[in-house]
């Protein structure tokens, strides 16, 4: 089991890195459109305005460091926790891990998602705030400045997170519910594909 956990951990790290670098521009556009629907009519307008005002790095890839931390932590913890969770489900059902059906394997993935949600919530909050920083400043909703360094910015946001324990707790519960559903069906799909190919 230790080898499986280590392999899962390393695969989760690489998967998290790849996910961020491929999907970060689209995630930035999504977050901006969700936070400021009155500013952007559609995704193309948001993309063009973001690119013109802030460029590629500060615009489309804003929030990359927190997103990397979030995805690497989430995926590595998820894949590291999956083997013990499969063992737990097999122990509860009193059957070998290899004999778990897709629903039972999906349940193990859902249990593993509980652990990954613990790492995801604080970094997601930092990422979303960083992605929408320009709009928040222009709307007068933030005391941050575009010239703030990343370290100063992260320190201010960490202070914000610790001062909003109630918000963090609510976000954790929502994230937990969302992640468990998503991981359950993703893992169920993968197990079904694997069974079909055998």
Image (spheres, grey):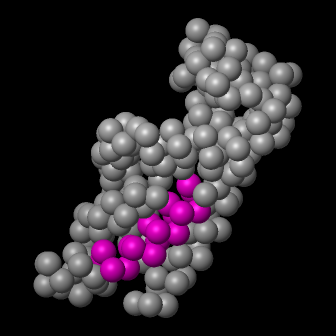
Q: In x, y percent, where is residue 63?
A: 67, 42
- Left or right position of 154 against 120: right
Q: Is residue 80 magenta?
A: yes
Q: Residue at x 83, y 28 (%)?
A: 54
Report whether residue 164 is seen. yes
Taken as a whole, is the magenta stretch helix, strand or loop? helix
What is the quadrant of the N terminus in the image? Answer: bottom left
- Start and end of the magenta stretch? 70-86
Q: Quadrant of residue 137?
A: top right
For the image, the number of numbered tags is 0
Q: Is residue 188 visible?
A: no
**Residue 30 part of the magenta segment:** no
Q: Which of the 4 image quarters holds residue 59?
A: top right
Q: Position of residue 185 (x, y in %)?
A: 36, 54
Residue 15 image point, x, y percent: 61, 64
Q: Is residue 90 left or right of residue 48?
A: left
Residue at point 72% right, 49% down? Answer: 151
Residue 44, compared with residue 176, is above or below; it is: above
- Residue for point 82% across, 40% down: 57
In this image, 54 relative to 19: left or right? Answer: right
- 100 relative to 30, above or below: below
Q: Residue at x 37, y 64 (%)?
A: 115
Q: Quadrant of the C terminus?
A: bottom left
Q: Nearer the viewer, residue 140 or 21?
A: 140
């Amino acid at each position: 089991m230790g080898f499986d956990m280590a392999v899962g951990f390393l695969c989760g790290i690489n998967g998290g890195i790849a996910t961020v670098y491929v999907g970060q521009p689209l995630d930035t556009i999504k977050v901006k459109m969700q936070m400021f629907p009155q500013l952007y009519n559609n995704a193309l307008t948001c993309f063009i305005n973001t690119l013109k005002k802030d460029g590629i790095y500060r615009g489309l890839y804003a929030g990359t460091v927190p997103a990397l931390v979030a995805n690497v932590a989430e995926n590595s913890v998820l894949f590291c926790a999956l083997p013990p969770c499969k063992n737990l489900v097999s122990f509860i059902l009193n059957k070998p891990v290899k004999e778990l059906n897709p629903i039972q394997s999906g349940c193990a993935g859902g249990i593993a998602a509980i652990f990954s949600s613990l790492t995801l919530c604080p970094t997601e909050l930092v990422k979303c705030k960083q992605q929408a920083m320009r709009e928040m400043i222009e709307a007068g909703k933030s005391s941050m400045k575009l010239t703030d360094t990343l370290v100063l910015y992260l320190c201010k946001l960490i202070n914000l997170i610790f001062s909003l324990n109630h918000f963090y707790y609510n976000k954790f519960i929502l994230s937990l519910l969302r992640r468990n559903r998503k991981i359950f069906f993703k893992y169920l799909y993968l197990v079904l594909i694997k069974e079909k190919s055998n």
